[in-house]
Amino acid sequence: MITEDEMAKAKGVEVLKDSREGTVSKEVQAELEVIERANGGELHPDAVWQWAWTHPKSALYQEFEWDTKKAAMAHWRRTAQRLIQFVVVRLHDDLPAVRKYVSVQSPQQSGRTYVTIQKAMTSDEMREQLIGEAAEWYAQGRKRYQVIKQLAQWLDDGSIVFKSLRQRK
């Protein structure tokens, strides 16, 4: 059980926003820190869900789908996404293999869908969408890894590439 002192210590954590994933509440972050401390400074996914399961009034508990049918369907969807993402294609002999399918905003339905990289690259709208998402992904990684000095030059070079791509519009 979490003591009030542990919760108070953990509540000072900054909440980071990741546009792909959303935000995590300070309460959830505090509970994750408690689990981390209880596990010698490591945070294992199994420890997180097991802790949530045994603390039904916690913020973490509310983040899980405990209905096994709904949880199974979500798991199957993630498995299908992973399998789709593992398929690769070599577009030219002199280029490395790339993902055959890419995720784009679906023009036919709400939400996202997968299309071949060839289809995405021949559609101005889809290509711009992918470039924009890549630039956003890069910017998030740049923030995340800016403290690693060995990556500084690479991060700066990448910024130049994305600025150049945006200026070509």
Image: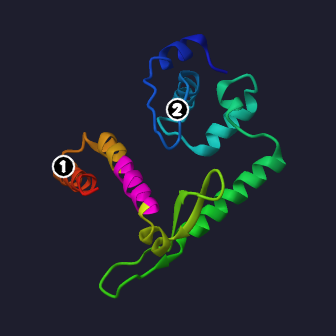
Q: Is residue 126 left or right of residue 70?
A: left
Report the label total: 2
What secondary structure characterizes most of the magenta part?
Answer: helix
Please, what is the three-letter code of the amino acid marked with disc 1? Asp
Q: Quadrant of residue 129?
A: bottom left
What range of the chain is rendered magenta? 125-137
Mark 2 Cα shell of 10 Å, populated few (<14), some (14-19), many (≥20): few
* Magenta span contains residue 7: no
| Label 2 to label 1: alpha-carbon separation | 27 Å
**Disc 2: which residue:** 23
Counting from the top left corner in percent of width and height, residue 123 is at 45, 67
Residue at screen point 66% across, 64% down: 80
**Quarter placement of the C terminus:** bottom left
Dot placed on the residue nearer the N-terminal end, 2 or 1: 2
Residue 95 figure quarter: bottom left
Please state which of residues 30 and 110 is positioned toward the viewer in this rendering: 110
Q: Which residue is mark 1?
A: 156
Who's the residue at 53% across and 60% down the image?
Answer: 103
The relative height of residue 143 versus residue 54 in the rendered view (above or below) is below
Q: Residue at x 53, y 41 (%)?
A: 21
What is the secondary structure assignment of the residue under circle 2?
loop
Residue 72 spot, x, y in % from top left: 77, 53
Q: Residue furthest bottom?
A: 93
Query: Does the magenta-highlighted stretch encompass residue 129?
Result: yes
Quarter of the figure with residue 149: top left
Residue ID at (25%, 39%): 147
19 over 124 or under it: above or below: above
**Amino acid type, residue under disc 2 in the picture:** Thr
